[in-house]
Image (cartoon, rainbow, N blue to C red):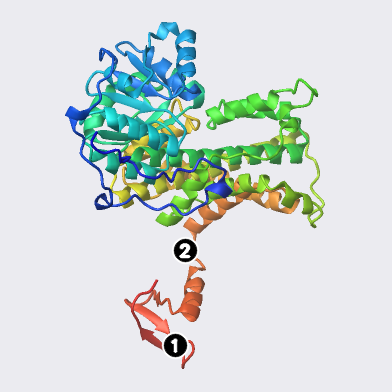
Amino acid sequence: MTSTTPPTGPSNDQDQAPHQAAQVHEGAPGIEEVDRPTADAGSRPAGEGDGRANIGVVGLAVMGSNLARNLASREGNTVAIFNRSKDKTDHVLEQHPEANFVASFSYEDFAASLSKPRTAIIMVKAGRPTDFVIDELVKVFEPGDIIVDGGNALFTDTIRREKAVRDTGINFVGMGVSGGEEGALRGPSIMPGGSDEAWATLGPILKSIAAVAEGEPCVTHVGHDGAGHFVKMVHNGIEYADMQLIAEAYDLIRRATGKTPAEIADVFAEWNRGELESYLIEITAEVLRQTDADTGKPLVDVILDQAGAKGTGAWTVQTALDLGVPVSGIAEATFARSLSSHPEQREVSRELPGPSGTDVLSGEDANAFIEQVRLALYASKIVAYSQGFDEIRAGAAQYDWNIDLGAVSKIWRGGCIIRAQFLNRIAEAYDAEAELPVLLTAPYFVEALGRAQDAWRHIVSLSAASGIPAPAFSSSLAYYDGLRAERLPAALIQGQRDFFGAHTYRRIDKEGTFHTLWSGDRTEIEAEDTH
């Protein structure tokens, strides 16, 4: 290379707790702001390799090595591997001889081991490590080759990287991968962005390793540049909401009925045989049944009640604020994790006044209450997904992505953390009306919400009266009622804004924009819109 200028520039990726990640993230720079040399194929360093691998993986931690093993297990794939640490590569080779990996110990040799167009999936820590690997691959790849980022990158960073790498003639794909370590090995849900050209090469490979739901591989070309990582971000935001709602359901049942975690596990196992069937409901039962070996107590009672986070929930909420999309269920789930992680505040607040509590329910009363919680959980879950798909629609409009919402719901049916029977209903809703403005207005969900709303309202009111925090249940119901309202108090807010800041307002009875001369004679005048 005639230039050593890194193609990707500084990283803004944040792989941190929400309170650390809650920084302003800016969009990608314009193409004119990215000064990159065009790749010169003749200047590529020559490496040792026979070009027999059709796909490569860089980064051999658990996710990377499992994905490489998944790729190697599929007929027709020969997988090249590379890791910064030679010891890690040697370990993977020793542990998995059946994979017949093509190992390299330099980027030059890694490139030489790949057939053209060279395709490499990066599975390293988000942020600067990702940028470093991209920069090294750009030095040894040629125009037409493909670099895939399979980590949890902030989508605006993916947009930036794609624009920068595109100028070298190399394709860059931001690819969301969901399913954790087991999914990477057995079959994940995959959300690739990038160019149509890259998808033509990548598509068959990714379809071969993805999870399969009802005969369909859980992968689709989501859209260009950052679309894949955007959809993965929203997936994780919905995951935050789903987990919080399940946790609130557990807490309500335990406090109101006095049931043990093992008994509540049976409740969740039963729920998993109905319309709430999902991976998260299934593992909740498993966690609640687990007994701690040291103390003999339920494991859930031994785990410190401070929830961690990787930042994707915060990104989802930040981005929704930028787009003007309400995602209150996801936001409350994110805030609940933050609250749990401030023990110093919780400690000094224990003696704050509150209700005396509620009588413990038993027998048929307990069973009736549990059914009400189930219905409230299902209704709130509908809201969380509806809000998430609203955000995807708004993001697609903002960034000029053609995202098929029905296709997204289908690839989430298997392999990913939020996989659920429920997603079939979402797919059906978008199949019936591709431009459905609000998911929860689809006939199936209207019926479900109608069945659930009385129970939902009872549970939210009981939680408030009893002092049991249920922020995701409560905010989801408030959002639902906000959508239903014929008129909202936003009119008063706009009047206030006009009073203190001359922000103007519009009227229901005539066209135009208006301002009241509040500090004058309070007459109304036509004005320029300053909303």
Residue 439 drawn above or below residue 483: above
Residue 103 makes an appearance in the image: yes
The dot on residue 486 is 2
Rounded to the nearest angstrom, the CA distance separating label 1 from label 2 is 29 Å
Residue 29 drawn above or below residue 53: below
Residue 429 location, quadrant: top left
Q: What residue type is labelled 1?
A: Leu
The dot on residue 517 is 1
Q: What residue type is labelled 2?
A: Glu
Task: Classify the position of the C terminus by image quarter.
Answer: bottom left
Residue 346 in the image: state x and y as whole percent. 74, 50
Side of 438 where 470 appears, left or right: right
Identify which residue is drawn at 43% across, 6% down.
97
Residue 34 in the image: state x and y as whole percent. 28, 48
Side of 46 where 450 appears, left or right: right
The dot on residue 160 is none
Side of 510 where 201 appears, left or right: left
Front residue of this view, candidates 523 and 120: 120
> Which secondary structure, mark 2?
loop
Identify which residue is drawn at 47% across, 24% down.
63
Q: Which mark lies nearer to you, 1 or 2?
A: 1
